[in-house]
Image: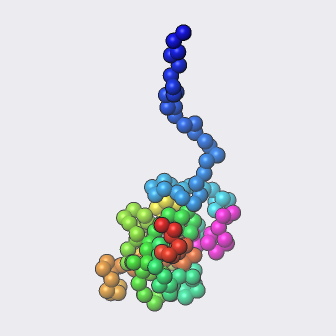
Amino acid sequence: MPSAVPATEPATEPAADPAATAFDQTPAGTPVEKTDAQWREELTPEEYRVLRQAGTERPYTGEYWDTHTRGVYKCRACGTELFTSNEKFDSHCGWPSFWAPLAEGTVRYIHDRTMGMDRVEVRCSTCDSHLGHVFDGEGYGTPTDQRFCINSVSLKLVPADDAGQ
Ligand SMILES: [Zn+2]
């Protein structure tokens, strides 16, 4: 009796798993959206104040304002890689300063007229968290003459030696 049973089933679509989450390795370009309650739960009060309420840490108090370690700076809220030590420079303003983001599109810009100033706010493109502000034409002598003035608490440095690659 001939056997006509196929050796393998045709490939089927993998079933969607609503429980699947990826908090740490979010692919770039995938928006991260969480409720305010979720952010409050995941972030420390200071992280929440800066990242989700557009606060500013006091100058010269943050973890990275005077850091020269080689590595990549990720978003503290969602883990997206935002800046690298290659573009970090000594602005002596009290906050970590970069002359460019890691790549085009990793951050987005919003006109900010609060605090009686006319500034450009910088946010993480992936999770829309507040990072800091960008200033133009201050004469720092960097390739772009821009200063991305970013709160340390918005970032998480992954030293190059610890990257595991
Ligand atoms: Zn983010």
Whole-percent x, y for residue 16 in the image: 58, 39
Q: Is residue 114 visible?
A: no
Q: Is residue 43 left or right of residue 9?
A: right
Nearest the camera: 77 or 13?
13
- Magenta span: chief secondary structure: helix
Residue 54 vertical placement versus 59 (above, below)? above
Q: Residue at x 51, y 68 (%)?
A: 164
- When asked about the image quadrant of residue 86, the answer is bottom left
- When asked about the image quadrant of residue 100, the answer is bottom left
Q: Residue at x 49, y 31 (%)?
A: 11
Whether residue 46 is in magenta: the answer is yes
Chain part drawn in magenta: 40-51
Whole-percent x, y for residue 33 in the image: 56, 55
Outermost residue, bottom side: 92
Whether residue 36 is in magenta: the answer is no
Nearest the camera: 119 or 93?
93
Nearest the camera: 34 or 88?
88
Q: Is residue 7 left or right of residue 139?
A: right
Q: Residue at x 43, y 66 (%)?
A: 107
